[in-house]
Image (cartoon, rainbow, N blue to C red):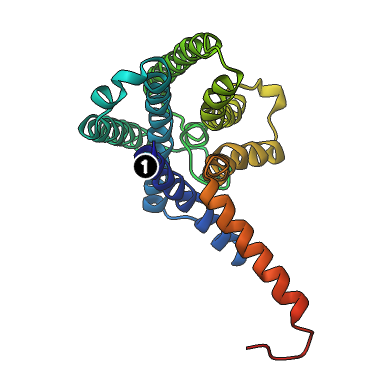
Amino acid sequence: MYFFLLNLALLDLGSISTTVPKAMANSLWDTRAISYAGCATQVFMFLVFVAAEFYLLTIMAYDRYIAICKPLHYGTIMDSRTCVNMAAAAWGCTFLNAVLHTANTFSLPLCQGNALDQFFCEIPQILKLSCSDDYLREAGFLVVSFSFVSGCFAFILFSYVQIFRAVLRIPSKQGRHKAFSTCFPHLVVVSLFLSTGLFAYLRPPSMSSSSLNLLLAVQYSVVPPAVNLLIYSTRNQELKNAVWKVMTGHFSEAINCPSFTYCS
């Protein structure tokens, strides 16, 4: 589990670093400009990190399924080599997918200006600027990608149906609570990731506006990566104890040290 959490932390860090720093720089310099190469790089990196995160969440659902439904076989099924191979497959597949989408999108001629109604470069906004029928090809690729996402979602759903069936058969109330609490952080992360993204891309056109697009973009590109590790850390008692010690330590120092004095 901690190996997958490490990968999740790297993906979240990469996802935020792809969009937020440039948006903050543009805000400070009162501009919305980005170079063509920078836009292509941003699209590529965002696709890599977001797709890899969803594939990793699917793998983590399988990990939870094995841990709860087949606990005696967990050590042999989810050994270190298997975990590394699964994570490498997620990174590799998303890298190839991002190369395909980025190359295809930026090969389209843009004849409707160069202003994107978004604070970062993303494929749907770029396709709106294309006047070529070739955009249908990229739309087809997006449909295929959505099919893969739907398959992963179906697998996650199937895994948790089996998990809940196994948990409800646990005789002790304490055992059921422990099993549910183990799965709760993953369910929250998956729900947050999917609900914000699906609503942003599948909402009706009548609900589209610049302010709403910005709000939804922040919700699916910034909020999930920022809160993922916070959600998972609620299961880490050592981390909670460390945070509590830091908070109580600073609070006691503030009480013992009056203002305008130096306390060594």
Q: Is residue 168 above or below residue 28?
A: above
Question: In which image quadrant can residue 96 be found?
Answer: top left
- Which residue appears at 38% of the width and 17% of the height? 144
Quarter that holds the N terminus:
top left
In depth, the one of 36 and 176 nearer the eye is: 176
Question: In which image quadrant can residue 86 be found?
Answer: top left
Q: Is residue 54 above or below residue 27?
A: above
Image check: 171 left or right of 99?
A: right
Quarter that holds the C terminus:
bottom right
Q: Position of residue 19 (x, y in %)?
A: 50, 50
Q: Is residue 66 above or below residue 212?
A: above
Q: Is the residue marked by circle 1 packed among few (<14), some (14-19), or many (20+) residues within 10 Å? A: some
Residue 173: in sight, yes or no?
Answer: yes
> Which type of secondary structure does the marked residue at label 1 adopt?
helix
Q: Position of residue 118 (x, y in %)?
A: 58, 43
Residue 30: in sight, yes or no?
Answer: no
Q: Position of residue 98 (x, y in %)?
A: 33, 35
- Which residue appears at 40% of the width and 53% of the height? 38
The residue lying furthest to the front in this view is 172
- Which residue appears at 49% of the width and 14% of the height? 157
- Which residue appears at 54% of the width and 31% of the height? 193
Q: Is residue 249 above or below residue 50?
A: below
Q: Amino acid at mark 1?
A: Asn
Q: Which residue is mark 1?
A: 7
Question: In which image quadrant can residue 156 be found?
Answer: top left
The residue lying furthest to the left in this view is 81
In depth, the one of 103 and 263 nearer the eye is: 263
